[in-house]
Amino acid sequence: MLTDSVEEGSLPNRFRALWDEIAPVGRDEGSGGYLRYALTEPELRLREWFRGQADRRGMPVTEDGNGNLFARWGEPTAGDAVLTGSHFDSVPHGGAYDGPLGIVSAFLAVDELRAAGVAPARPVVVGAFVEEEGARFGVPCLGSRLLAGEITVDRAAGLRDAGGVSFAEALGARPAGARPELLGGFAAFVELHVEQGRAMVDADAPVGVASAIWPHGRWRFEFTGEGNHAGTTRMADRRDPMLTYAFTVLAANKEARLRGAHATVGRVAVEPNATNAIPSKVTGWLDARAAEPQTLTGLVDAVRAKAAERARRDGTEVALTEESATPLVAFDGGLAERLAALLDAPVLPTGAGHDAGVLAAHLPTAMLFVRNPTGVSHAPAESASDADCAAGVTALARVLEELTCR
Ligand code: GLV
Ligand code: MN
Ligand code: MN
């Protein structure tokens, strides 16, 4: 049952009170960003917090064998539940809102509906998906992909973090994989998320509705050369993979700009990583995204070709591996229009990936965005005002009422 503190005060204040419960968890005092990697201590504490919140609301929690948590309000056998929620995990030194906002807002939306005496004809389920960012095991939306059968159990189980720990080890069991009977129990999924750009600042709107997610993916470039002495190896004799890597980063930037696409190399590993040694190997991860699938394919093909050509000139070798690929997601147009009309909210596409993008191929899915005044995300400056977060909760409650009562 709800405690008085949840029921008291204005919605922005109640949002702040609940938000403050999780705000310190996994926060790095130096950067002000969050280190909430999937199934590590801070994320496990947030999962415990989730169970506590569900418990105080009398919502039984189930785990799907893949690391995803579900708290249910309503009759479990109804079979047409509306799922809402998001994820707790962060990118390294990520912002506070990407993920947790959708979970905190979901619990508060349940509170709003209950306080208004709404008795949904269908269950509402609050979900917390595991490893959405792929920051620990490399594949984004790992929990939703497993649940939907969009990654094999073998591959997911064997993914390893930087310390060599496998996903199965971190989970404590081999993942269960596809759960069609569980997914089939959901009539719709609505993920509320902080906006990750400035479109809603420009639109002067606190809440928006998603139309689409750009196709995107991650590619690992491994550049191999010859490790050698920085002081004694003549420039002409070097086979330096750092040069091929550097050229490839510039080529990715240029090819993306030429196509109106996005390309980022935000992660690099150098071996042996010594100031006075020519590297033997450099690994760079390309994140590429575009509005159209053919633009994305053209971009990655062009970067691959330029890297290979440069490797020939540098006397190095390059190998390319696709680590994940997410196709274009067009959210259910009828649902998006219905929710936009209900909320009088703008409809906008995004270049960011979400569990909603994975589940959209399996059930009617929508996303709500909450305005982010900085427009910054995946960095500590990500933000949202308490008033806008409250507007997000109100919008989500209206959407849940619309989908569960009509
Ligand atoms: C997830 O936030 C992504 O877009 O990479
Ligand atoms: Mn993110
Ligand atoms: Mn997210």
Image (cartoon, grey):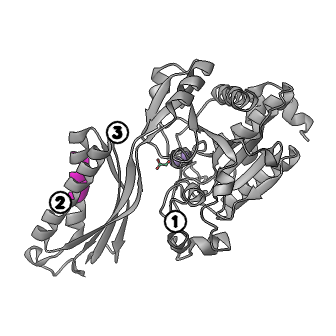
Q: Amino acid at mark 3?
A: Ala
Image quadrant holding the N terminus, namely top right
Q: Secondary structure at mark 3?
A: loop
Q: Is residue 393 left or right of residue 341?
A: right
The residue shown at (48%, 46%) is 353
Left or right? Give the position of 153 relative to 311.
Answer: right
Q: Tell me what residue is drawn at x 69 percent, y 54 percent.
A: 182
Q: Residue placed at 45% from the left, 27% from the top?
A: 199
Residue beneath label 1, please?
137
- Quadrant of image for the C terminus: top right
3D distance between C-alphas at marks 3 and 1: 26 Å
Residue sitting nearer the eye, 293 or 353: 293
Residue in front for this viewpoint, 258 or 74: 74
Helix, strand or loop at disc 2? Answer: helix
Is the shortest distance between ligand 1 and the CB of mark 3 under 8 Å? no
Image position of 151 (left or right of 224): right
Residue 159: x and y in percent read 51, 71
For label 3, the residue is: 291
Kindly identify which residue carries mark 2: 305
